[in-house]
Image: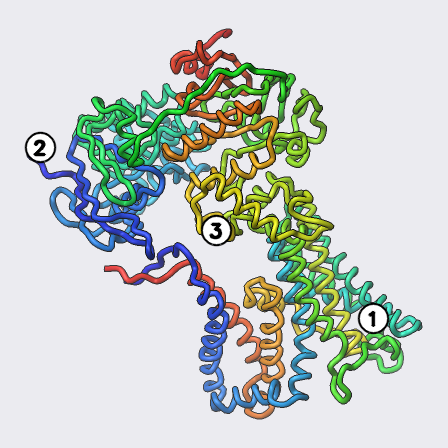
Amino acid sequence: MTTLPPLIEMRGISKSFGPVKANEAVDLAVAPGEILGLLGENGAGKTTLMNILFGAYQPDAGEILVNGKPVSIRNSADALAAGIGMVHQHFHLASRLTVMENLLIGIPGKGGRLDRAGALARLDDIARNYGLHLDPDQPVSALSIGEQQRLEIIKALFRRARLLILDEPTAVLAPSEVDGLFSALRAMAAQGLGIIFISHKLNEVRALTHRCVVLRHGRVAGRVDVPAETTALEMAQLMCGHEIVPPERGPSVPGAVVLSLDAVSTGGHGGMPLRAVTLAVREGEIVGIAGVSGNGQRALADVVSGMLKPQSGTMDIAGKRVAAFTPREVQALGLGRIPEDRMTTGLVTNLPLADSMVLPRIGTEAFSARGLLKPGAIVAFAEAQIEAFDIRCPGPMVRAGALSGGNLQKALLARELAFDPKVLIAAQPTRGLDIGAARFVHEKFLALRARRCGIVVVSEDLEELLALSDRIAVMYEGRIVGVLDSADASVSRLGMLMSGAGGSA
Amino acid sequence: MLRLEARQRTPAWLNLTLPLVAIVVTLILCSGLIVLAGAGVADAYGVMFKASLGDSYAITETLVRAAPMIFTGLAVTLAFRAKFWNIGAEGQLLAGAMASCFVGAIPMPGPLAMLLMAIAGAAAGAAVALIPALLRVRLKVDDVVSSLLLNSVVFYILMALIEGPWKDPFSGYPISPPIEDSAGLPVLIEGTRLHLGVLVAVLAAPLVWLLISRTVLGFRIRVTGENPEAARYGGIDVQRVIVIAALLSGALAGLAGVGEVGGVHFQVMSDISPGYGYSGIVIAMLARLNPLGVVPVAIFLAAVMTGAEAMSRATGVPAFLSDVIQGTALLAMLVALLFTAYRIRRSA
């Protein structure tokens, strides 16, 4: 693999957006058969670099070589022609069409007709070579998230991609699905394909990749030649440029129950409904909710947050029965909420950050009187929280959408914690965050726990749940199928329960 | 090759100059039509300017015409801020005109009549706007279509009235009976048609601005418009906010009709609005949904309309040019808005 020219080589790539240098003199090469890890905190320039490779941006300087020859990639068609395929975090699939129809989108047929027989043969080849099986006639809407991702990979291979870029592919997968993905990626590499693997999960990077490039502030901050022999901590320190001390989860004696659900069932609202869920959260404890995506976690978070009224069952917050299940009601009872989707549910990206920070409490006397806003109080509140939570932004009047994911999450935490919640529910609180920001969130949760708040963390990241939680409840098909003390829990034990094969716990 | 690239941030000067650039581009584009009509561009625009803003009487005439457009512009602005797509300001204006004409024809003391006309007109406009709002929040009916189609419904109700019960029994003209003399809005400057309604329209703009930017309701309207999901998560009753925004929007459009009946025509006829409701959409967009921007934009378009008539008489260019200018200005503004979000890059 050393004699061949690299599949792809980026030399001295620089790209600026106004004064911001997103990439500066980045060199990166992927050899045939190589899996390259691309690491970096949010805003380090990974996405910009990959967008340049895929033709969405033009670099200000530098060149791209494919098989040793310089190429110009002006759009995604050029990228595909150069053999570069990309699997985005958010899938680009037509959900009403079948697997086969999605594969054939944009592919010229024979004499104006789609070459279905030929496509079936190719699909068969891909399935045999890499273990990527899908029923060609299934509609995409019937596929699980993992299967949709598989389709995206097949799509790239179908277009004869020689280099595959995967942006955080494991964020949406269950542990067993991750194993399947990894063996497929290894099979591709064994057949001479190149892979760029972007992930925040350093243990996965260590297990899968042959080599890593670490970006920081748009530059290459370091390279890791043997990831398997490098610790996750060492990689993390390369990424953030300073030493990291993992948070300490001290002992805590849980007190009275502050949040309880009793036999709560919901109707379907587009996702998996809850089926007779009973759960109690006590003050001073963190309860993790584990489960493969789509097993009722969203419905649970929605019910607790007052976004979904259950069909049956009861919920109490701090000893008071919830009646209307509205956001205002649960909030007034002392519940803090961190929504799963920061950009669409949490904040209003087009309005000033300050507006998003006071949104849930705009009608309270802190921010308004007799229907009139108190602009001074709103800005002062936002400024104080920006200071207290070290939210990096030009000021409270900046468009919320201009902030990075980590800073948005800090802003959401700030708006909830400022009012001393008795219970906090956080859905996927560190999804998409880099190590530094995730750590900040975890520290805040532990500090809240020490202040006797009851905390529910819904997450698909088992490492996160194991590190944070006092107890972990596992959801499967809308039910809680087991609650483990975190001392007794392990990834494999949780994985069993998550796949529905746990029996009683 | 040229391509669009997303901007990281929009410079402030760009936001301010874009409407002006859009207007200049519009006038340049429309000069081609003037040439086609066989007139001199400088002559035509010169006549337009003189007839609309050239002397104090011309200015008052332009302001009188601007008043209903300020109201409809504000109506559309308020609705669009909540992303309630009210294309029905025209029908709401007509409803306001009919209701105020009905009230104004009842003998009573002048000030009381004016107040009741305003209330009745606003209520009628609000009632018309309520229909598409309820259809949207209850049945998810597209508000663009329902509010637009209601314009025809209201217009033909008006036609039925003036061809039927309101028809002048002596002349046979399809016009309503006039309102009481005492119910007519007072004239502000002797010898002109500048009536009280114009002042109210101009004062309404800062009030709407205050409502949107300084009240809790305005906050909820803004948040609902920008992101209904975050609004709901934040405890806002999104459906209620949309209905309230629709009612206020309809009321403002209704007041446009009140001003026309009380201050200009003193009765209702089929052409009481030459499309002021639709102009409101153009105005709101040109003002970039800023209520304070509505006043100058409405005056500009009113000047174009007033001026186009004079230009037509003097140079033979058809007065329809004012419609073309309006439409072109809207398109130019939409293109200009693109450049607040994107910039043009040259790529190899």
Image coords of residue A152 (percent x, y): 34, 35
Relative image position of residue A16 (x, y in whole percent): 29, 53
Label 2 is placed on what type of residue?
Thr
- Label 2 sits on residue: A2
Q: Which of B128 and A375 is in front in this view?
A: A375
Q: Name the residue under label 3.
A: A395
Query: How many numbered marks appear?
Result: 3
Chain letter behind tag 3: A
Foreground tag (2 vs 1)? 2
- Residues at marks 2 and 1 touching, judged by CB atoms closer than 8 Å: no
Q: In this view, does B309 lie to the left or right of A397?
A: right
Left or right of B17? Residue B319 is right
* Residue shown at the point (53%, 34%) measured from the top left: A339
Comparing A40 with B261, the one in front is A40
Q: Is mark 3 on a helix, strand or loop?
A: loop
Q: Mark 1 lies on which chain?
A: B
Kindly identify the amino acid type of the residue bearing the numbered disc 1: Cys
Q: Residue at x 68, y 68 (%)?
A: B71
Secondary structure of the residue carrying numbered label 2: loop
For disc 2, the chain is: A
Report the Cα–Cα distance between label 2 and label 3.
51 Å
> Which residue type carries mark 3?
Gly
View extreme (left): residue:
A3
Q: Residue at x 70, y 71 (%)?
A: B201
Q: Is residue A322 shown left or right of residue A106?
A: right
List x then y, in percent, for residue A235: 27, 29
Q: Mark number for residue B101?
A: 1
- The image quarter containing residue A249 is top left
